[in-house]
Image: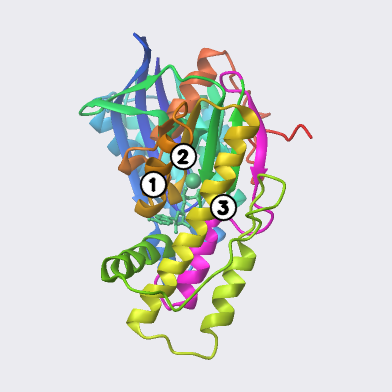
Amino acid sequence: MRILAIETSCDETAIAIVEGTVAEGGTSFTILGNALLSQIEVHREYGGVYPMLAKREHAKNLVPLLSAALEEAEMLRKDLQSIPADIESALGTLLEREGDLAGALLAMLREYGVPDIDAIAVTAGPGLEPALWVGVNFAKALALVWHKPLISVNHMEGHLLAALLQEQEANAYLLPETSLPLLGLLISGGHTEIVEMTDWLEYRLVGQTRDDAVGEAFDKVARMLALPYPGGPEISRLAERARERGGANPFTLPRPMLTSDSCDFSFSGLKTAVLYLVKDKELDETEKEDMALAFEEAVADVLYAKTVRAIEETGALSLAIGGGVSANAYIKRVFSEKLPADHPEVSLSIPVPFLTGDNAIMIALAGYFRAKRGEFADADGLIADGNRALGTRLK
Ligand code: KG4
Ligand code: ZN
């Protein structure tokens, strides 16, 4: 089954075409086409992501990315199409708030034949609602013109499934059958949560942040240290330097909620502790590196301790770490060094590096499994939901 997937939840615009097939020991996925454009440079001068700016960039980039992904998949065949007037008008209505998107899309759709795909998957949440809507409406327009079914995908399910992919050869991956229960530690710019997959694709929320997301805390602390957006990779780079240098760290930071009786997190206290230590001071390079190290270690300690607690509460046999912050080398190291000793029964999955941040391949994975279960969305019911949850808490 071939899925065309669209991702516009935050500051990456991405389109991928992925083919999934049942294989021995799991599902194999071939990436036929993958096109992604990051808006980091656009948002950097503002020090964060502006939803309306993100929305405008998505609208501008979707058609060129669609062409690029189809071309890579060898599905961009010149074949003039006539689009019936009623469909053209419905498409215009769908995209009327997206600048020139309708015009650009119609021009492209008139020129090329219908691609050989089975369904269109789109991120419907969580994320920035104005940004999500562009992708959702774009997906609806394609589904309308090409007569393809739609799948509404949860962005966090995408991050979770992406962590399970194992590279077989160039562009070919296996998503192995995974022992359940599986825990997902999902850490990104907007979310920090631990979910339990009890049955395949059925989730229960085990813990979540009560305030800031971990990526958001990285970004805010980076700003306090006058580092550019996004702050995660910057903090990580500075912390690594302090680690190499060694020696005592003059800064100590708290481990919020470490001993609390739950799997919930809190990062705003940690952020405030940094603020208190840096305010009215001009930190030199060495001090910035030490602060980055203290912060990264505090975060990793809390993430690890809460995850172990969740493993012990649920009896999980697998752990997948997903989301933008799963790119963090130190956090990955803490988990891969400590988990085998503390919980040898738990197998750990971390995304291959190019799938840690937002992308459309992960949306295609979720789309594939949802389509396999016949979970298609009808166009009228498919809405963007910025707060869409992956699982609900039982207690
Ligand atoms: O999943 P993602 O790409 O977008 C959201 O859905 O939010 O996550 C982006 C977040 C940003 O906060 C960024 O600073 C953080 O991931 N991030 C990192 C690293 N790389 C990206 N945080 C810590 N260490 C990193 N190496
Ligand atoms: Zn994300």
x, y (%) of residue 161?
46, 30
Q: Label 1, secondary structure: give it.
A: helix
Residue 332, numbered label: 1
Q: Which residues are magenta?
A: 199-228
Q: Label 2, secondary structure: give it.
A: strand
x, y (%) of residue 104?
40, 44
Q: Nearer the viewer, mark 2 or mark 1?
A: 1
Amino acid type for the residue under numbered disc 2: Ile
Q: Is residue 18 above or below residue 276?
A: above
Q: Calculate the distance from the C-alpha at mark 1 to the C-alpha at mark 3.
A: 19 Å
Tell me which label, 1 or 3, sits earlier in the chain.
3
Q: What crowding class fits label 3: few (fewer than 14 Cα within 10 Å), some (14-19), or many (20 or more)?
A: some
Residue 190, numbered label: 3
In this figure, which residue is indicated by the disc labeled 2? Answer: 321
Image point (58%, 66%), residue name: 254
Could you tell me if residue 230 is visible in this image? no
Quarter residue 111 falls in: top left
Q: Is mark 3 within 8 Å of ligand 1?
A: yes
Please check the rendered image and state whether residue 184 is part of the magenta-colored stretch, yes or no: no
